Image (spheres, rainbow, N blue to C red):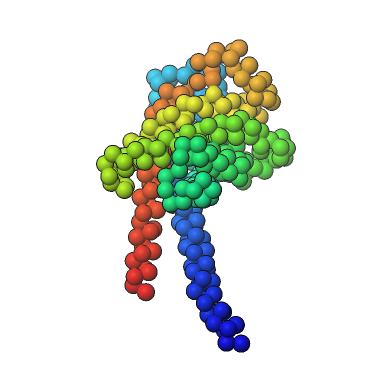
Amino acid sequence: MTHSLNSHQSRLPVAQATVLSQTQDLRTAMDSLLCGAFAGAVAKTVIAPLDRTKIIFQVSSQRFSAKEAFRLIYHTYMKDGVLSLWRGNSATMVRVMPYAAIQFCSHEQYKKHLGGYYGYQGKALPPVPRLLAGSLAGTTAAMLTYPLDMVRARMAVTAKEMYSNIMHVFVRISQEEGIKTLYRGFTPTILGVIPYAGITFFTYETLKKLHTEKTKRSQPYPHERLAFGACAGLIGQSASYPLDVVRRRMQTAGVTGSSYATIIGTMREIITQEGVVRGLYKGLSMNWVKGPIAVGVSFTTFDITQGLMLKLHQMSYFTH
């Protein structure tokens, strides 16, 4: 009886430690979700007018140039007012907040599990698992939030009279084109996300690791984070851009009168009508402006807010 009691008491600290560890893991995951959602919202709102303009060019056969892009922004502003430049941003927020939350949170979890698997727990991952963690995070987020991306693309390229709000887009697409349409362009999205998310997270994490090794500072300054994020966005988006154009064409086929049904068919049609560079890379120069800004702001916001949450938890722990 005494032995049983003693063994129970000796097991109690271990059980408490397990519960405490699980609670900390859950809190860390919730923090990542909240910080990710906030980071995504801030980044996308900053570049929303450029994003909308890029989508309009991507889904049309009109030739892209910086001059034409800014002319479109100016005409939109003159015709419908400054807020029209953020048309579709509510749909973007509905999509990007869960997308960014899932992406950042799952990235932290994948890093943790891959770190444990490869024996790098609590340390920077080696290159291949680092690339894999980013790709898996992007794929997870894209799979769970894809219909919202479809809706956002439709709202960006149509007049406000066609779709009054996000729910209206869902209802009209489901009734007029079928529920399957909500997943049109899903395959090129996933094929594009794998290199994009992998390269973006890989580049950012690698630059942070190199920075720590060189400066001996555990954390970069905010402006350094912005620069690392900008580099990551530039490389990642350039690598996956043609699939982004294909995805947008397939998503908006129902309202542009086109019949883009397959990835190869869409690519072939774009190349035949507009050429490789002017077609598949249309709007890339604008992406080189908005992409690095968005990724830089997103990563920096996430890191800073995550650091603040950690400090708040530490303060609350010591006060108790």
Q: Position of residue 214 (x, y in %)?
A: 28, 39
Q: Position of residue 153 (x, y in %)?
A: 56, 34
Task: Report the residue that reaches farthest toward the front.
Answer: 3
Q: Is residue 102 above or below residue 160?
A: below
Q: How many marks?
A: 0
Q: Position of residue 157 (x, y in %)?
A: 55, 31
In the displayed structure, does residue 261 sit left or right of residue 88? right
Residue 48 visible? The answer is: no
Q: Position of residue 241 (x, y in %)?
A: 51, 26
- In what quadrant of the picture does the C terminus appear? bottom left
Q: Is residue 133 above or below residue 22?
A: above
Residue 64 visible? The answer is: yes
- In what quadrant of the picture does the N terminus appear? bottom right
Q: Residue at x 26, y 41 (%)?
A: 215
Q: Residue at x 63, y 16 (%)?
A: 268
Q: Residue at x 71, y 35 (%)?
A: 177
Q: Residue at x 55, y 34 (%)?
A: 193
In the displayed structure, does residue 306 sit left or right of residue 223? right
Q: Nearer the viewer, residue 96 or 31?
A: 31
Task: Report the residue that reaches farthest toward the left.
Answer: 215
Q: Nearer the viewer, residue 58 or 67?
A: 58
